[in-house]
Amino acid sequence: MNGLRSAARFLAGAWWLQMKQITTGRLYALTAVLQPVLFATIAFLMFRDAPQQQSPTSVALGAGLLGMWAATLFGSSAAIARQRSMGTLEGLVASPMPLILVILPITVASASLGIYSLLATFGWGALFFGVPLTISHPVLFAVSVAVTVLTLGLLGVLVSAAFILYPAANALSNAIEFPIAMLSGVIVPVSSLPAAVRPLSYLLAPMWGVRAVRSAVLGGAPVAEPLLVCTALSLCYLALAAVLLQVLVNRARDRARLALT
């Protein structure tokens, strides 16, 4: 019990520290502030003249969620590279705290900052594109956003595990950003994707989180079921990331390649 309490205090303190660090970084702040507005503008202009009209609220929501995922991935890919460049990665790996608990606050903080994407997108759409600021189920919306943020953070941990031994982490993150966004139903509905790739969408917890958020905003669909599936898949991500990180760290120690120098 004391171990769980200590881990919870560590995660909360580390999350707050990471929030302060990433909000003071000029590059990250610039990306987090401008990207959602650009995504929203492009989305509104694209779907405004589309043959099949979509709800402006749905378009705004998709652009905001895309910005949230981009912020999470940007922070996840930079997490390992930043620690490596500062020379602290070796110390973190050697510390008594499991590495997954060190990386988790970084990715969750990045996803938390992505909440701004939703707010900025809705505000931008309301001011310049006439998007109505209506949410069918406000309480469920808040719960869905919180679960989706945590889910994106856990997916970020899983992604960052691949960056332990990969020096060009940012290049890899750029390559997977939009494919995962497409499969998650952020840009287009999953039903419009080719049938061959839809099973991959159902394995992505963010897809269920996106579905829950959309249902809470637009109404007309259940919210609890996708939230439960999203939570279950997120726990699987956590377990897989813990195993993968340990395997990669052991491999790096054996080959003495952690610093990549």
Image (spheres, grey):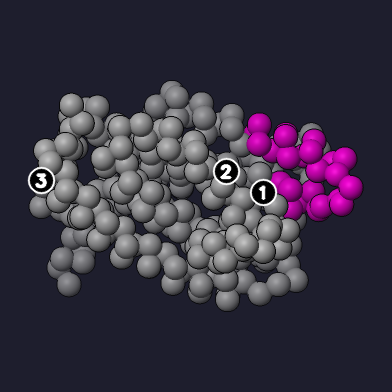
Label 2 belongs to which residue? 178
- Image spot of residue 6 (x, y percent): 18, 60
Numbered mark located on residue 145 in the image: none
Q: Residue furthest front?
A: 196
Numbered mark located on residue 187 in the image: 1
In three-dimensional space, the C-alpha distance between marks 2 and 3, rounded to whole angstroms, equals 34 Å
Q: Magenta region: which residues?
A: 37-60
**Callout 3: SS:** helix
Q: Earlier in the sequence, mark 3 or mark 1?
A: 1
* Contact (Cβ within 8 Å) of mark 2 with mark 1: yes
Task: Tell me which residue sits at (52%, 42%) in the image.
Answer: 177
Label 3 belongs to which residue? 254
Identify whether 120 is placed above or below 204: above
**Callout 2: SS:** helix
The answer to whether any part of residue 216 appears in the image is yes
Q: Earlier in the sequence, mark 2 or mark 1?
A: 2
